[in-house]
Image: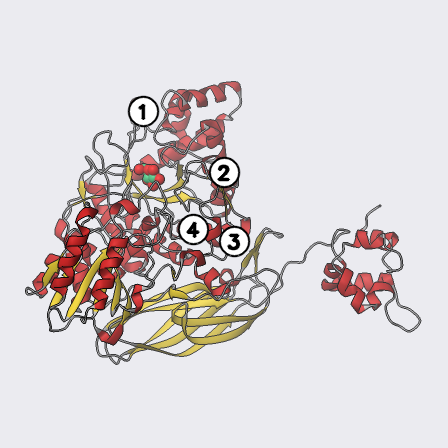
Amino acid sequence: MTAPPGPGRDTVASLTTAEKAALCLGSDFWHTAAVDRLGIERIRLSDGPHGLRVQPAEGDHVGISGSLPATCFPTASALGASWDVDLIGEVGAAIGLEARAQDVAVVLGPGVNIKRSPLCGRNFEYLSEDPHLSGRLGAALVAGIQSQDVGASVKHFAANNQETDRLRVSADVDERTLREIYLPAFEHVVTTARPWTVMCAYNRVNGVHASQDRWLLTEVLREQWGFDGLVVSDWGAVHDRVAALAAGLDLEMPPDLGVSDAAIVDAVASGALDETVLDTAVARVLRLVERSRARRPADIDVDAHHALARRAAARSIVLLKNDDEVLPLTAGRVCVVGAFARTPRYQGAGSSQVHPTRVDTALDELRRARPDLTFAAGFDLTDPGRDAALADEAVAVARDADVVVAFLGLPSGDESEGFDRTSMDLPASQTALLDRLLDGSAPVVVVLANGSAVLVTPWHERAAAVVECWLGGQAAGGAIADVLTGAVNPSGRLSETLPLRLQDVPSHLNFPGEEGHVRYGEGVFVGYRGFDAADLPVAYPFGHGLSYTRFHHADLSVATTGSHDTGDLAITARLTVTNTGAVAGREVVQLYVGAPPGRVARPPRELRGFTTVDLEPGDSADVELILGSRDLAYWSTAHARWVVEPGPFTFEVGASSRDIRLRATVHVDATPPRTPLDGTSTLQEWLADPDGAAAIRAAAGTGDDGRPTGVLGDPELLEVIGNFPLTTLAAFPGLGITHELVRSLTGRSS
Ligand code: BGC
């Protein structure tokens, strides 16, 4: 381990072991430790990720109580649907500015864990089921926060994809799946946005607590990705402080005072812990403190941040369906139904819960545009006993309307940090009410508020429009009004698949695991990768989202320069997008790559590039997306590295993963690594290798007729026993594979 450069080095030498140990723990729930005699200040860390949750006193950790007001921006589930790196960068900068105003040095976010199952209780804090998208959006948030000289903490590293048994469960996941699905978002954030800190997860990964996993925290994070910041524990993730330190965990939060510091001091005294390991961690803590000195106080324009929250929420709204262009709302009588219109659900529960500076309601905001609208709650958010009467009233009020807008969603008790859901259904009282509204003559627009995906079957077929708003933050009400009235043309896209049935979800049979283990049995086939591989129908695919205008994609060209083998392969995809509708709009161009059949099973398509383009009606824009070798590669467990196999790769451009508009196939040359051959290699493996085949054919020799002897000259037999290791075949008589031959090929003595 090498210590990072910086001002910490000299200071480290002047610290006592006890002071060093103290610096590697917090001093309280939210602060690092100070060393007054050396002028080392303490700094404050605060949640995160979609707004600040600063608890000025000790606080209650996961409660909202006592936290200072801050702008509640859209949650990650919403921001993920914006596919908008610039906008997320702006949100990050605003959070960073608020951090400066509240004397926060490090914001605990973003969370870039993959949505492995729609049941994960914390999905509202995560961006996507896709690592490419999560990585790009997560990096934008980090860059935005850090543009204010405030640190970010990308979390929860790694494989924290459920809440069930979250402090102990072992995510049993093979390395290829880790490298291709669960790590790349972290990798991208770390290598491009250089977060000041990374927060380790609570759970175990393949049996080892993330906080004590040297492979994860040191080999992968620092040695392979070049991370030069500080690793902080999730709150309470450390079980053995000395083992965690040795694994690369620098700062334990909250501190286990009197226990962890004593354990460190004792371990150094006994020689169980090399003091240089402690010094390295201390230097990282000091560097973090030093970095945060650049932070200046700031004043917040609360109105401007609210306006940004509204813009971001509007960008995050996904128009799933819009039959007969029922939206945007035109003239006619509008009836709003649903308690969420008046009492919005706009954020999730747990450590990310923000005390908002204000909260818009969709009802008030819609009334500004349509003062004559009627409203009925339809259901009660706290007292189900009132639901039947409220439903009757709503159905009666809706009878006079030309269009009904039904605000449905998950009650706050249904999803939270700390537990997973057991179903994807909306509450029965809401779907029963909806059925009655759908039986009426007026078209019904369903507006959804939920952090994790909900089932839209079967009712979505009868709804005229479905508008997914996620948990859109404190300004969601205004944003929803903007989209419903057409002031904003929706451009959000699903960052996760909406299945027809929970049972179809690839992780379903392996979620949330049992007896302390959750097996990631679906491997790399997470989300749309799995739905596509199984060719399963879905309600709405990954990447889907409608607009009030239409876009035409044309003229895809894919050109390559350089080569994979020389390390400079660049693949440039170009196309033209035209707004063929009547209003201005924004298209999210998505580029998917499909690999040729090869040594490992690959998903049919994987998102490898995306960009947004704003177009006036009739206007066109040229779009260019550039990919590299890594975008074609899989992680080979056998070779412990990324591998590109040669062959025809498919490049698909679409408006969603299932609305592919253009396709090009390009042959890519690459020399895949050769598998070392020995006696345990099969005959087929020997024959598949050019040098191996030549050697074995030469050694086995030919008969009088010039044909190979033994099994090499018998294609049918070769088919049957070609997958036997060479040493096994040597024991079978008459095949022409002798022990002498094996010895001569492998250089083995026996
Ligand atoms: C959560 C983290 C959070 C921390 C501090 C933990 O329970 O998992 O995401 O940052 O608490 O509140």
Pointer 1 residue = 35
The percent coordinates of residue 561 (x first, y second) are: 51, 70
**Label 3 beta carbon within 8 A of ligand 1:** no
Say what amino acid the circle numbered 4 marks: Thr
The percent coordinates of residue 652 (x first, y second) are: 45, 71
Disc 2/disc 3 C-alpha distance (Å): 20 Å
Do residues under tags 1 and 2 come within 8 Å of each other at their CB atoms?
no
Disc 3/disc 4 C-alpha distance (Å): 25 Å
Q: Secondary structure at mark 1?
A: loop
User: Comparing marks 1 and 3, which lies closer to the viewer?
Assistant: 3
Q: Secondary structure at mark 4?
A: helix
User: Comparing marks 3 and 4, which lies closer to the viewer?
Assistant: 3
Pointer 3 residue = 523
Of pointers 1 and 3, the one earlier in the residue sequence = 1
Q: Residues within 10 Å of mark 3 (few under 14, many from 20)?
A: some
Do residues under tags 1 and 4 come within 8 Å of each other at their CB atoms?
no
User: Comparing marks 2 and 3, which lies closer to the viewer?
Assistant: 2
Q: Residues within 10 Å of mark 4 (few under 14, many from 20)?
A: some
Say what amino acid the circle numbered 3 marks: Gly
